[in-house]
Image: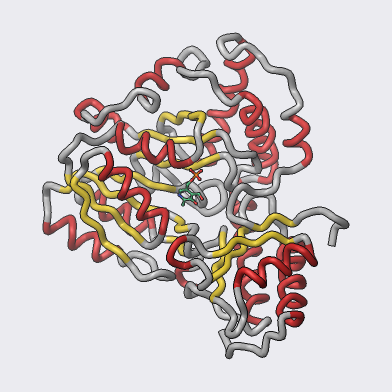
Amino acid sequence: MKAQQINLRIPGPTPVPDEVLESMRAQMINHRGPDFKTLIDRVTDRLMKLFQTENELFVLTCSGTGAMEASIVNTLSPGDRVLALVIGAFGQRYSEIATAFGAEVSTITAPYGEAIDPEDVREALEADDSIKAVLVTHNETSTGVTNDLASISRIVDDEDRIMLVDAISSIGSIDLPVDAWRCDVVVTASQKGWMSPPGLAMASVSPRAWAAYREAAMPRYNWDFAKAKSYLENGQTPWTPALSTFYALDTGLEIMAKEGLPNIIERHAAVTRRAREGVRALGLSLLARDEVASNTVTAINKPEGIDVAELLKVVREDHNVVLAGGPGALAGKIFRIGHLGHVTEEDIDDVLTALGQALEKLGYQGGGPA
Ligand SMILES: Cc1ncc(COP(=O)(O)O)c(C=O)c1O
């Protein structure tokens, strides 16, 4: 293990490569001048390649939740019927944002650790023509589950509704071809797979989303996509951007461009295989089945007879490995290894070694096979 270096293995913020940190030392620039235009044009272009989209793409100064809100207020009106697919805390958040702005939200839920059955989405849409939009979490970070977005998006497209996608912990790490899957608004945030610190969120906007925008009457100002579009045409953002995070993201994207999207996607898959095999080898069980397991975060059930908070404390204090607990209702029931962005199989080996030693220290007797 690297001496005194913390192995931050939570699902965001994620560790940032040294080159990215270095780039943040740069002096401020005029965000209405030519240098920022060069920067935002390059960042936007690189993001579009990694989103696999020709849609317009905006970089917003906020965390991911701001972009989730932007996707809703730019496409919907109070009273619009919306179908939210909820498999954990972040799907729940998406539905709450829509409700807060006056949408009539119905939900399809799946138990923790499970994914949405796309056929349930088809049934719900066929049964109700008035549903205007579907809200979906591509990768539910709270449970370590990835929804079958390819199938869901085909159904939503067949039914000609709008699909808003929280891809905050997936895109750039897990394959999400935005145009091929006809996703209307797709959002993510800089502190996830992008090898960058928190501070920026990104949203791609399809022609169908723009058509919805023209009718949408929810209140909006800060998040108005038309303002973002008109400023971007001049190489600017409507409001002061988080410049240092822009510098970081630019470098993170350069590193990602060198690695190439297929290699990035395969690295995340390989790291996940390592994590899941290693966790099982320790005698622990996984929350999600292999078929729906996320390639960016692995959720592990509470080992029998072990206090999760105590386990994470020993791992942190004795081994400098930082893992995430279970959020909300899953607190004390699971813990999570984040493996997105700047992550290698060696990082996972570190985690597994630390976990094994911590379990031994706490007298873990084994809780049956995974
Ligand atoms: C799937 C998902 N949605 C939404 C969010 C919220 O993002 P933020 O904390 O950047 O607002 C997160 C962050 O963990 C997430 O993983």
123 or 228: which is nearer to us? 228
User: In the image, residue 353 lies at what x, y percent?
Assistant: 77, 72
User: In the image, residue 1 lies at what x, y percent?
Assistant: 84, 62
Q: Quadrant of residue 247?
A: top right
State how the image is colored.
secondary structure
User: In the image, residue 154 lies at what x, y percent?
Assistant: 30, 54
Q: Residue at x 18, y 63 (%)?
A: 123
Q: Residue at x 69, y 66 (%)?
A: 313
User: In the image, residue 268 lies at what x, y percent?
Assistant: 61, 58
Q: Residue at x 26, y 51 (%)?
A: 156
**The furthest residue to the top:** 33
Is 172 rendered above or below residue 142?
A: above
Q: Answer with left or right where residue 291 lies relative to residue 307.
A: left
Q: Quadrant of residue 233?
A: top left
Q: Residue at x 21, y 55 (%)?
A: 106
Q: Quadrant of the C terminus?
A: bottom right
Q: Answer with left or right where residue 279 lies relative to residue 164.
A: right
**The furthest residue to the right:** 3
Is 113 rendered above or below residue 49?
A: below
316 or 160: which is nearer to us? 316
Image mark count: 0
Q: Answer with left or right where residue 246 lies relative to residue 185.
A: right
